[in-house]
Amino acid sequence: MPTFAEARRIILEYVTPLSAQRVSLLGSLSRVLAEDVIAPRDLPSFSNSAMDGYAVRAADCQNSRALPIIDYVPAGRLATKSVMPGTAIKIMTGAPLPDGGDSIVPIEHATESGGAVRVMQPVELHQYVRFAGEDVRKGETVLAAGTLVRPYEINLLASFGKAYVTVVRRPRVAIVATGDELVALGETPSIGKIVNSNSYSLAAAITSAGAIPVLLGIARDDLDSHREKLAKGLKADVLITSAGVSMGDRDLVREVLEKLGVEIVFWRVKVKPGKALAFGRKNGRLVFALPGNPVSAMLTFEEFVAPALLKMMGRGQTVKPLFPAVLQSELKKKAGQTHLVRVRLEYLGGKYLAWSAGKQDTGLLKTMLQANALAVLPEDRETFAAGEEIQVHLLDGSVGMTAL
């Protein structure tokens, strides 16, 4: 049985980024570039004014002399005249720098009267001029393959007219819930039945990670139903199941997966919650059999599945970084396995403080709603005293929380 760290390392060793695809510019947001982007031209492509003001020659502005204004250049237009010695051209931000001009005087640094401008402050050569190629030179690699596309990258790509971008493909992730006790969303469960909520929380988590969920419904507690659903799921890039992976009479997932040719790489991990996790593969496709308790399913997805999906999509950072927080009340656990404890963080006095989010039973959803982070408690310890530092990482959607 692998440890928490070993299980995650094994999973990531089996993962390689998916193939590339060409998508629209906005479709590339939060995706990873699959090829270098080379600048097709300088940026800016022409020298221009960084301010509303006057294009001048710096040498003409040293004695507060009045300079006749001989032309006006709004953004998007070219000057019809050159800046001759002893003259100025009125110019707006972004307009091309007229020939002969070498500096810009902002409007607030000058006084205009009677068709002339008087410069009120010393002028430095090239001030407020954005020169062609100052930002990016033609032929420069502006974005390397492996870059995550954010709104900033979108702006640069749009500046070069990139309407389409080559990125790493998003994996399709099939979800199969198992159990006769499950009813579909929209049905009212009778006594002994529960709504298939795991499929929807997993689909939301898959979407949040950037992948594409494919809900395949419920596999009932018989071999034929499991075989039909799991075979269909194995056509996706990744198959995730929930429940049916332990040792009960109706826990059929591993048996059916093996009959379908899936190599079970490991089953059971030294972690709580999530001990019953199984990981397998078939023909390059990954299989994660998650526990059925809602909290266990979500946390095993968080710690094991999400990093694999991120690596498949070309992301360099796949595992959330741990950082220290000061525990505010004692925590106890059994030695021999890593514990994932839902905690509430607050940033006070220059440090993070951590409180337990409540009872840690894996069937209780409320603590997931109250938590904004997970404490990762090492397997070799049992007691963690109030006042000592523990290692934590943020949960997705933790508004206002930023790791140091």
Image (cartoon, rainbow, N blue to C red):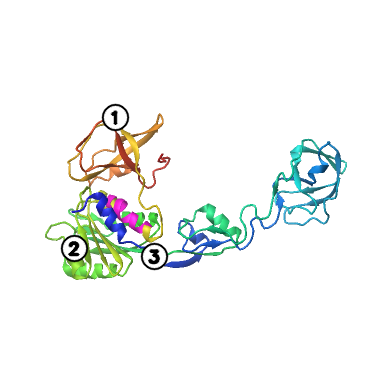
Dividing the picture into quadrants, the one containing residue 192 is bottom left
Left/right of residue 113 with respect to residue 381 in the rendered view: right
Question: Which of the two labelled residues, at mark 2 and mark 1, occupies the earlier sequence position?
Answer: 2
For disc 1, the marked residue is: 387
Q: Between 311 and 253, which is closer to the camera in this rendering?
A: 311
Q: Quadrant of the C terminus?
A: top left
Q: In this picture, which residue range is highlighted in magenta?
A: 299-310
Q: Between 336 and 276, which is closer to the camera in this rendering?
A: 336
Q: Quadrant of the N terminus?
A: bottom left
Q: Between 316 and 195, which is closer to the camera in this rendering?
A: 316
Image coordinates of residue 25 in percent, x first then y, are 53, 61
Query: Judging from the image, what secondary structure is the residue with disc 1 in?
Result: loop
Residue at 30% of width from left, 44% of height from top? 368
Label 1 CA crowd tier, 10 Å (few <14, some 14–19, many 20+): some
For disc 3, the marked residue is: 18
Q: Amino acid at mark 3?
A: Leu
Question: Which of the two labelled residues, at mark 2 and mark 3, occupies the earlier sequence position?
Answer: 3
* Mark 2 → mark 3, Cα distance in angstroms: 26 Å
Dividing the picture into quadrants, the one containing residue 307 is bottom left
Q: Does residue 270 lie above or below 236 as drawn?
A: above
Check if mark 2's residue and mark 3's residue have beta carbons within 8 Å: no
Checking the image for residue 254, the label placed there is 2
Q: Is residue 308 magenta?
A: yes
Q: Main secondary structure of the magenta part?
A: helix
Residue at 29% of width from left, 63% of height from top? 286
Q: Does residue 358 lie above or below 205 as drawn?
A: above
Image coordinates of residue 155 in percent, x first then y, are 57, 55
Query: Judging from the image, what secondary structure is the residue with disc 2 in?
Result: helix
Q: Amino acid at mark 1?
A: Gly
